[in-house]
Image (tube, helix red, strand yellow):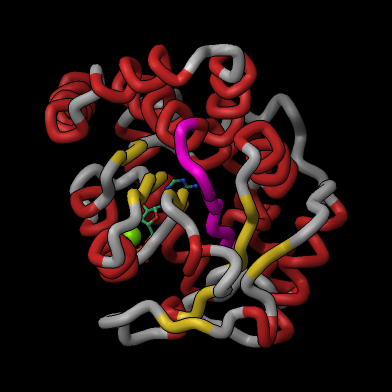
Amino acid sequence: MKISKTHPRYESLKYRHRLVEGLKKGYVTQSGLISHGRGEAFDYLIGEKTIPEAWEAEKAAVALMLLSKDPVISVNGNTAALCPKELVDLAVSLDAKLEVNLYYRTLKREKLIERILKKNGAEEVYGVGRKANKVVPNLDSDRSKVDSLGIWASDVVLVPLEDGDRVESLVAMGKKVVSIDLNPVSRTTRKASIAIVDNVVRAAANMIRLAADMKGMDREALKSVLDGFDNGENLEKTIRTMRQDIS
Ligand code: ATP
Ligand code: MG
C-alpha cells in the first residue's frame, strides 16, 4: 500500500503499515498491534514529539550506557518493525550488544528479527535459538530466556516496549534498566532505573545524536550528567507536562 506524504497522519500511518507488514511476515504478533495502539494514544497526549523531560532522560541514559562496561539493547518484534536501522546504529554508537527478547518466543520469529537486524548492519545478534541459554530468576514467561554472553552478563539493559515484571527481575539481578515506554504510569516505567517516556522511533534517533555529541566527554563529565538527573522527579514533571499539553 502506498501512503500519500500529504496525508495529515502520514507518519502514524507509515509506522502502522510497518507493523502490519511485520505481522504478515510473522515477526510482529497480533498483541504487538494492540500494544502499539496503546502507545499511539499516549503519543497523542504529548503532541507526538519529544518533550523536554524525555530529552533529559535520553541524555542521562546515553551517559549511563557510555559509562557502562557491557550495555545491551533488547529488541522485540515491534521495535524490529518500527526502527531497526536506528537500533543498530544506536548499538554501534554506544558500543552495545543487540539481543532478541520476545514474549511470544519462537525460533522463526527470533531468526526473522536477527535477519532484519543483520540486514540493517548488525554484525552479531544475541539471544537467538540456543544462545538464549540462561533464565532470569523470578520471571514467569519466555521473556526470562537470555543470552549468557548478552543480557545475562550485562550491567545496563535498554528495554523498549517492555514488560514491567522483566524490568523488575532485571533490576533485582543488579542491572540498571533504561526503559522506553510512552505510558508514564506503566509498571515498566515505574520500575526502570531511567524511564524514557517517548516514542521508540524518536528516542532511538535522539540517542544516536546525543551519543555522537557525548562520546568525546570524559568519564567525570558523563558522571555529572548522570548525577544531575533525578528519575523520580523527571517522571513527575513528565506527567505534569502531559496534563498541560492536554488542557
Ligand atoms: P506494564 O509495563 O504496565 O507491564 P504492559 O507491558 O503489559 O504494561 P503493553 O501494552 O503490553 O503493556 O506494553 C506496551 C507498552 O509499550 C505500552 O505501555 C505502550 O505505551 C508502549 N508503546 C507501544 N508502542 C510504543 C512506541 N512506539 N514507543 C514507545 N512506547 C510504546
Ligand atoms: Mg510495559
Is residue 4 rendered to the left or right of residue 32?
right
Q: In this figure, what is the number of numbered marks?
A: 0
Res 247 seen here: no
- Residue 125 x %, y %: 72, 63
- Residue 6 x %, y %: 71, 25
- Image height of 239 relative to 214, above or below: below
- Residue 177 x %, y %: 35, 50
Is residue 24 rendered to the left or right of residue 206?
right
Q: Name the quadrant containing residue 234.
A: top left
Q: In which quarter of the image is ligand 2?
A: bottom left
Residue located 63% across and 86% down the image? 106
Front residue (pair 80, 241): 80
Q: Name the quadrant containing residue 107.
A: bottom right
**Figure quadrant of the C terminus:** top left
Is residue 140 rendered to the left or right of residue 37?
left
Res 181 seen here: yes
Residue located 34% across and 56% down the image? 175
Is residue 206 rendered to the left or right of residue 240?
right
Front residue (pair 177, 78): 177
- Image height of 109 relative to 140, above or below: above
Residue located 54% across and 16% down the image? 214
In magenta, the rendered stretch is: 67-78
- Residue 117 x %, y %: 76, 56
Magenta segment includes 127? no
Residue located 62% across and 73% down the image? 127
Q: Name the quadrant containing residue 225.
A: top left
